[in-house]
Structure formats: structure tokens, C-alpha cells
Amino acid sequence: MTDFSSVLEFIRSFEQLHPDASAYEITNRLRGYTKPSYTTKAWTIVTGFEQPFVEAKLDQNIVFAGELTDFGHFVAALSDQINQPGLQWSDFARWTGDHTSWAGDIGSAIELYRATPGHLKSLAEALDRFAPDSDHSANIAAWTVGEMINQTQQIRLSEAIQQYHAKPYSDHVKTFIQQRFNGIFENQTLTNPAKIEAEIRNATFAYLELSQNAGRLKQIMKSFTQKLRSTPERDLLSADLLQGSLHFMSHLIRKGNLAPLKFKPYQQPQAPWLGTVNYEVSV
């Protein structure tokens, strides 16, 4: 595992080699130092920047803001969080930075579990493997650093990363909950968990709709009215989405040092007026 100072020094040196490049360009160039899967045509489309793979220099787990973080995952997610210059194809699509980060991780785990029966014992195993804490911490770091850069366009990537590293991860988690999901706290208790869970489920569902790999899942994602009808396949997908969203919420609650919660999720996250289910979930 590489330490933070080594990674930061590499990024600073890279910035010095490209003194006129924006943080957007630097970040996307650094994707070439993560892993080949982050330099595919799909990444070119969503980021608006073509970058070939160079070497896996940044494909490392490091302690970032006090939390073990997949730094290559952070760089890749950040490349789609920073505002792109001009108009890009992705500006006309429903795709957002959520889908290249936490929603994509949850959705990918569901895809892989359902597409390869028998390869994984359970969806819980798939989520732990393909949406682990180190990926979620990377996603939250990407969102936070992306916000810094988008709001202060003259800031260098290395400066934003250093500022992020200077605060404890639990503070970043709380800020993420408040600013990304309009989370409301009373002391250390999140008071609107059902609303946040519904938004996570909706974003993950959108990822599955947009994904080119969803396969059979896409066949059951038709019109809005069809989504509201209960069928065995849709009930299964609904259960998967709920389990995935609760997996992410569990990370947020634990790592934000927040009080454990019990609440009733909405029956249909896109139709909260239908009310909640008749059972409680825990995170």
C-alpha cells in the first residue's frame, strides 16, 4: 500500500509537467495511471476525455482522510464529477457522476450477481466484493473534491486533495449526506433516512437502465406504470435495489459516526405517495 505523501507528490509532479492544464484535464490524464477498465470508450464518453492506459501507478489503496481508500477508483470517479468544458454527449443524457461512482458500484454488484448465477453465494457477498468500503470512501472523496474544484475553478487538484485529506472522513461523510441528499440531523441521528434511501435506490435503478451490461434486467425496466406493477421479477429487482441501497447507507451511518437507525422504506422510491412498507430495516 502506497502512502498518501507519495501519491500527492506524484500528482504535484504531474501538474508541473502540464502547467497549463485544468484540474479537469489533469484528473482525466491521471485516469491513465489507474487501470485499463477506467480508460475504455465508455469512460471517454461519460467524461468527454479520451485517455489511454499508461501504467497502474495510482491503482493503490491508501489511507485518505483517515480512511482506507481505493485511490484509482477515486481518480476515475472524480474525472466524471468535475464539470466538463463546453457541451459533451453526456450533457444530453441522464448519466451523472453518481453513475460512475456509488450508484454504479451498487448497480454493478447487482448486475454481476444476477448475470452469473452460482458464482457468488449471495448479493451481500457481491456488494461486499464490488462495492466495498474502500470504493465508497473513494466515491465520497470524489464527490467532495469535485465540489471543491467546481466551486473554486482555479484550485489545483493537488491542493483540493490535500484539503480533503486534512479533515476526518466522518466529517466528509456528514457533509456528503447533507449536501448531496439534503440529509437532516438531530445531534448524531439522521432524521430523514427513508428519503435518502429512496434517492439511492432511484439512482441505482437509473444506472441499471443506462447500463449496456444489464441484459435481462433491462427487459423488466419498461414504462413508469409498469414499474409499479408487482411481478416476481420486479419484486426480485426491488429487493436487490433495497439491499444495495441499505449497503451504502450502512457505510454512511457507520463511517459518519451516526446513531444506528431503524426505519420503513418507501414501497416505490419513485412514488413516495404510495407510502412505506409495513416492516422496518436497520442500518
Image (tube, rainbow, N blue to C red):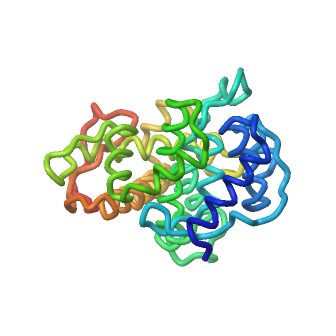
156 left or right of 239 in image: right
Give the camera-side residue of 142 and 160. Answer: 160
Residue drawn at x 49%, y 37% is: 147
87 left or right of 41 in image: left
Q: Position of residue 174 (x, y in %)?
A: 31, 49
Residue drawn at x 45%, y 41% is: 202
Q: Position of residue 148 (x, y in %)?
A: 49, 38
Residue drawn at x 53%, y 45% is: 160
The quadrant of the image that shows the N terminus is: bottom right
The quadrant of the image that shows the C terminus is: bottom left
The mark total stands at 0
Q: Quadrant of residue 253?
A: bottom left
Give the camera-side residue of 16 and 31. Answer: 16
Q: Position of residue 169 (x, y in %)?
A: 38, 59
Q: Position of residue 35 (x, y in %)?
A: 75, 62
Residue drawn at x 74%, y 47% is: 16
Q: Is residue 94 above or below residue 255?
A: above
Q: Is residue 208 above or below residue 22?
A: below
Give the camera-side residue of 58 and 49. Answer: 58
157 left or right of 245 in image: right
Give the camera-side residue of 264 and 173. Answer: 173
